[in-house]
Amino acid sequence: MVYQTLQEGVFVIHALKGYEEHERRIIELFTENNISFEFVTDGDPSCFNDEIINTYFTSDIKTKLSDGVLSCTLNHILTYKKIIDRNLKYAIIFENDPFFLGNFVKDLYKIESEIRNLEKGFIISLENTTLRTPSVWVTKKDKYIYQAKSCRHCGAYIIDRQGAINIMNEIFTNKCNNVIDWWIDDVIRRRIVKVHWVHPPMVEEGSHNGQMNSSISTKPKSYYRQFAWKMQKFYKNYIVRLFPNDYIIR
């Protein structure tokens, strides 16, 4: 499962212009790790037209989202369509600023058997964007995947074919009405797909750890943001986790 997915099922949400640094870094990072991938830019603002927007979104979406946020969301949706059209069993979707927190490929093989045993129709969050993690009271030795109540944003995740089908069926029935992160959370709450968290997380986004700019955030990279992120991460990973929380479905 892991080998095949790394060869044909890795997608990177990207923009056609303005993020050349991100593009160079992705190519270097993924080449170093022997990961084949595809940039998804079909939803770039330059490609917007009424037909494509009306196919996937509610009629008021342009009053809610900026072009950059709408483009990012559309690229996620078009990736789900690619997964279905290509009959992929699994896919890994990244936004264009991932930082691996360990040996990413090796860690994927660690969780492979747990992935195979999941009920079809799922998303597996690989990232730490919200800095929410399972409490020490629910994690177990040699267990890495935990069913959760909500997503941790859409910066890095595994999705299976059935999950993509379920999401696209929901879009064609009711349309997407928000930015991808919030809309996916709503989809999860309505049990259209299940979400699981990998613990420890395997990826963090450069737009959140302060090391990169984001295509949808106004916050630039800075040493201050890097320092603040590290302090928050330490506090939430080593202090907050000592106390029970309700993130995980037991």
Image (cartoon, grey):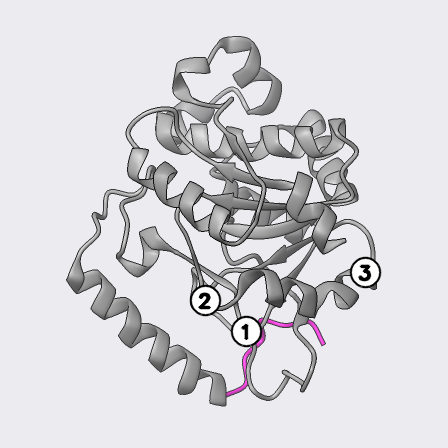
Query: Which of the two labelled residues, at mark 3 and mark 2, occupies the earlier sequence position?
Result: 2
Q: Is residue 249 magenta?
A: yes
Spatial distance from mark 3 to mark 2, Cα to Cα?
Answer: 23 Å
Mark 2 — residue?
101
Relative to residue 19, is residue 108 depicted above or below? Answer: below
Instruction: Say left or right for 228 vs 73.
Output: left
- N-term mark: 3 or 1: 3
Point out which mark residue 226 bears.
none
Give the amino acid type for the residue marked by disc 3 in the picture: Arg
Which label is found at residue 116? 3
Query: What is the distance, in whole Å, between disc 1 and disc 2 at their CAs?
Result: 9 Å
Instruction: Please provide percent x and percent y for residue 132.
Output: 48, 70
Between tags 1 and 2, which lies in front? 2
Q: Residue 200: which numbered mark, if any? A: 1
- Is residue 146 rendered magenta in the image? no
Residue 111: image quadrant is bottom right
Amino acid carrying mark 2 in the image: Leu
Q: Are marks 1 and 2 in contact (CB under 8 Å)?
A: yes
Decide if residue 95 is on the left or right side of residue 151: left
